[in-house]
Amino acid sequence: MMFGKFSRLGLETSAAAAALLVFAMPVAAVAQSQATQFNIPAQTLGSALRAYGQATGQPIIFSEDDVRGKRTTGVVGSFAPDEALRRLLAGSGLEVKRTAGGVIYLGAAAQDAAPAAEAATSVQEVVVTGTNIRGIAPAGSPIETFSRKQIDDSGLATLDQFFTTIPQNLAQYTPVTNLNGNSVGGPSQSGSNNYAGAFANIHGLGPDATLTLINGARIAPAGDTGSLVDISLIPLAAVDHVEILADGASAIYGTDAVAGVVNIVLRHDFDGAESSVRYGGATEGGDDELTASQLLGKTWSTGNVLLVYEYDHQYGLTAAQRSFSSGIAPTDTILPTQLRQSVFVTGSQQLPADISLDFSAFYTTRQFADTFVIPAFASFNTTGTSDQYGGNLSLSRKLFGDWTGTFVADSSRTDQNRDLVEFGTPNLTHAVLGVDSVGVRADGSLFPIWGGDVKAAVGGEVRRESIDQSQIDAANPGTDSLHRTVTGLYGELFVPLVGADNGVPLVKSLSASIAGRYDDYENSGSSFNPKVGLSWALNSSLTLRSSYSTSYRAPSLTELVPSPESFTYNLPNASSPSGVTDTLVNEQGGNPNLRPERATSYSAGFDLTPDFAPGLKISATYFHTLFKDRIQDPPIVGSFFDVYSQLSTLAPYFQFNPSASEVASFFNGPGFAGDYAGGGQGGVQAIFNNIPTNIAASTMSGIDALLSYRWTNDLGEFAVTGNAAYLLSNEYQPAVTTPTVSLLNLYGEPLRLRARGSIGWIRAGFNSSLSINYANSYDNPLTTPESRVSSLTTFDLREAYRFSEGSPPLLKGLAVALSVQDLFDQKPPRIVVDTGLTNPGFDPANANPAGRVISLQLTKQW
């Protein structure tokens, strides 16, 4: 153990007091000074502007072309935000501009002789998540941004660990929910975590319904179904910030954006070198972790380049190291051992003919291992690797007016290997999943109307998806090479109905977004999806927004292409004279007749930035998603051996009295595992098609709420944040022939309420943050009768100090950080299972088994 136990005396009182402090302090702080304490040293202008955004909570949109090669003398001291920004921009030739919606842009300063309207069009704007049009935020859609500072303040080692702290994300597929014994995929999810990866899962609608991007581009998927993006392969040191659009977005991005989009934006214009090393471990033993990274960056007058290397070793955790996991074998893995190394390169260069080049390249390799034992039956030992590599190239050129054309090419691969030894027999699986795409886009202003310029974007892309996989298994050997081409065309309009110059009472600004996208899948049909959004600023403090969209998820290649596997078995059947029926079970895995899953989403919300409390922002969004035609295996309740007792719902999957030729096609075909019924071809009485079909539906609704407040006084700079996800409904219908069931507040599923709040303090190099995490109580249906799982409240603490520029050379640029996760070492709520399923003793989707983890990090800038 690293430290002694903390006393739990008075924990509930402390939790309540801390929660009250986090969420009530903004009210008491309204009277504080409006100035902000800045500590932004001399550096590249781009890095300084991002630091300004983190300090003020107000992100700024600017073009990398405008800041490339420019430096600033920095801002240190207490200043009004506008004054601090003016000082940062001094001598840069840039000036601040604001749109009708209040978004801040930086653009080239207008010449004295230039008309104001002409100057406004000279702003170099960039594309943000949720739209293809530069310089605007998507009207009507909520976007949540997690800055680099927020990521650092979490004190966590990996990106997938950070995602478990986001209330809107359900950690249903993470290294905690590994294959051997900890899998919690509920009826609304499919697949198991064979490769110990981690996947974003907005609102728990399924990781395959969340589109994950890197710098706005798709990357090769991973996982069993080949439709998920493994965020555990992305080094945390390379991440600048994370943007989450919790809204349907197939009209912008195409397939998979049903629950929303996660865009992981990489760092780029870092100038200099930064070395970091972090070591931590659980005070109760186990879960040791070592992370080290090196950044090397260079910026010049026409470009920049950044190299990031990260090493991460997670030493794992076994059941013997946690008392609540006594229900499984002591050697069973709770947290798998993982070793990852990553190299990321990003850069940009201004070329002749007014062409801008941006590029990125990456390579990650991750090894993993876990063990699971069923006493007196079998042991399962899994080892494997997940490698990911690829790159992105973007060329942009000004066309005419403020129109810009962009060409983008992406290529990436995920190479997965798994060696599962079960019953002493190896089962080797290898798959290479690839995505290659090229696309073009043009966007700019069309014509002016009353509220400003109508802007548009048009474009298209061609994408090739592929899977090459092989399996060495006595029951199902074989190789597959699958691929398809996807063609997409899209268009988008931004219509400013009312602008800042012509606002009227109760309508300071009013804007609408209209988007549509058509995608055609080779041999799999097509899909068209629209989206409409509306943003209405009543005044300078309150903005209302709403959106409506349709989205879809195309079946993955592995879901479409059958993998032959069948066998016969005498399944129990009370209606049969012999009590059993000789049944040929068809488990071919894929179904070429699958259609895309489809969804309809709408949302409504508000953003409040009251004039009487500068620095305070409160947002809330109501969302509702109807997800239908979901791909689902036959809705078997309980054991596979009970299928004949469920004919009322499973009848569509049975074929009674099959023809001799059809039975023979299975017996003589590839993947026939054996005639375990023993009756030969003539003995088969029925075929049970255990294959995926478009039969399921989901309905989910809830409220996301965000709060942030920043203020400064004589004690320093303070920041308070709050983030909560409250679900109103989570209904699931496994098939049209089955009743709808509620999955709300159940083991392994999204909880009704998850929340995280934090308070931070900065002064004279000190940086402190205290966070509180809350998960409400819920039901455990794996006991008879159902049992109740208690709520969980944990605290995270981080204390950091950065030595000043005037420190001795060895200390100059050095930062030291001490982080404590689960400060009071709260054990996860105990889970009991009566169904005979494996029971790790906790809910891997909603709790962390590690307990208190203490880590020390040293970061040195050179």
Image: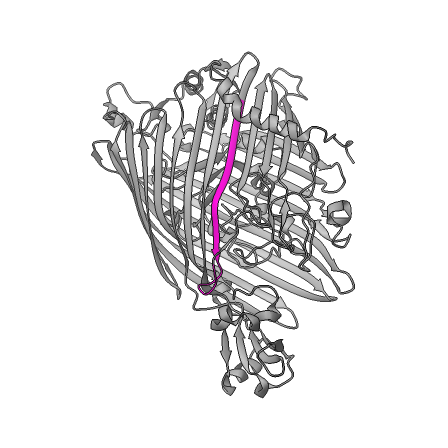
Left or right? Give the position of 73 relative to 576.
Answer: left
Q: Which residues are magenta?
A: 719-739
The part of the image, by quadrant, that contains residue 398 is top left
Left or right? Give the position of 376 relative to 506.
Answer: right
Our reading of the magenta stretch's main secondary structure is: strand
Colouring used for the render: one colour
The one nearer the camera, 688 or 269, is: 688
Q: Quadrant of the N terminus?
A: top right
Percent across and percent down for residue 710 are 49, 22
Percent across and percent down for residue 79 are 47, 14
Q: Magenta segment: does it hold 247?
A: no
The one nearer the camera, 789 or 792, is: 789
Report the number of discs.
0
The part of the image, by quadrant, that contains residue 630 is bottom left
Q: Magenta segment: does it hold 736?
A: yes
| Residue farthest toward the front in the current orientation of the protein | 785
Residue 89 visible in the current orientation: yes
Relative to 155, say whether 116 is above or below.
Answer: above
Residue 135 visible in the current orientation: no
Percent across and percent down for residue 607 are 40, 31
The part of the image, by quadrant, that contains residue 612 is top left
Q: Quadrant of the C terminus?
A: top right
The one nearer the camera, 564 or 388, is: 564
Percent across and percent down for residue 792 are 63, 38
